Each structure stands twice: as structure tokens, then as C-alpha cells.
Image (spheres, helix red, strand yellow):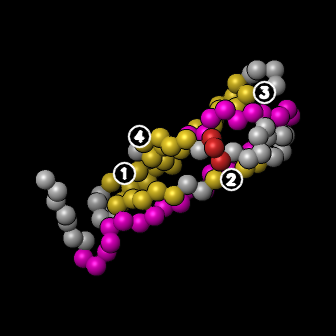
Amino acid sequence: ALRVESCGDKTCKEVLSYGIEIQNVGDVPLAVTAVVFELNGTPVSLIGDVQPDPLNPGQSISFEPKVEINTCASLEYSGEVTVEAESPDGDMCQDSEEIIFNII
């Protein structure tokens, strides 16, 4: 069964953009091996958008994934980006950042 709730004159759906920047702050080139954006447990790989690859020291890349959220329901949203990269000598690096916000 499908239940549709009204939210007055609101559409209940909004497109949200996340600004993501990946920067090589080290002193060797890094081959980016994974970029995953996850919203409330649903992962999306962004590795196909990585240009240039490898990232040289001081270089950065930006992404702006867009997701649709429900603004009529009281929900907590958790957005997390995880990046993995490999140095020329095979060392792996990983970093992640999470943003949590609520719709009330």
C-alpha cells in the first residue's frame, strides 16, 4: 500500500547538493582508488569522476553530488564521503568526512 501525505503547498522533495573537495596535501602523487559518497547508508561511487588521476602534490578535485531529500518528514540525514588513495610505493591512505543534519 502507498500512503501519500500532504505537506500544504510544499512539494516535500528538494534537491540537495554536497560540495566535496579532495586535495593531495602530501609530497608524492596519489592514485585515487575509491571515492564513495553515502547518504543514510546508500553508497554511490564517484571514482569515475576523478580527473586528474593521479593527484599531484597540491592538486585538488571537486565534486557536487546531488540527492533528493524529503523535507516534509522529520528525518535525520547522514552524508559521508570516503576517499582511498595509493602512493607510488604502494602505501594506502584513507580519509572520510561526515555531515549530519535534521529535518524537523
**Residue in view at x 47 percent, y 40 percent:** 43
The span shown in magenta is: 8-36
**Residue in view at x 28 percent, y 60 percent:** 73
Gap in angstroms between the C-alphas marked 2 and 3: 20 Å
The disc, 1 or 4, on the residue closer to the chain's N-terminal end is 4
Q: Is 65 displayed left or right of 26 in the figure? A: left
User: Which SS class for mark 2?
Assistant: strand
Gap in angstroms between the C-alphas marked 1 and 4: 12 Å
Residue type marked 4: Gly
Q: Is 58 displayed left or right of 8 in the figure? A: right
21 falls in the magenta region = yes
User: For the residue carrying disc 4, how many other residues have a C-alpha within 10 Å: few (<14), some (14-19), or many (20+)?
Assistant: few
The residue where tag 1 is placed is: 76
Q: Is residue 57 visible?
A: yes
Please identify the quarter of the rendering in which residue 71 is found: bottom left
Gap in angstroms between the C-alphas marked 1 and 2: 25 Å
Percent from the top left, x then y, of residue 57? 84, 40
Mark 1 vs mark 3, foreground winner is 3
The disc, 3 or 4, on the residue closer to the chain's N-terminal end is 4
Gap in angstroms between the C-alphas marked 4 and 2: 22 Å
Q: Quadrant of the C terminus?
A: bottom left
Q: Is residue 96 visible?
A: no
Percent from the top left, x then y, of residue 52? 77, 45
Percent from the top left, x then y, of residue 85? 70, 32
User: For the residue carrying disc 3, how many other residues have a C-alpha within 10 Å: few (<14), some (14-19), or many (20+)?
Assistant: some
The residue where tag 4 is placed is: 41
User: Which SS class for mark 4?
Assistant: loop
Residue type marked 3: Ser
- Mark drawn on residue 62: 2
The residue where tag 3 is placed is: 87
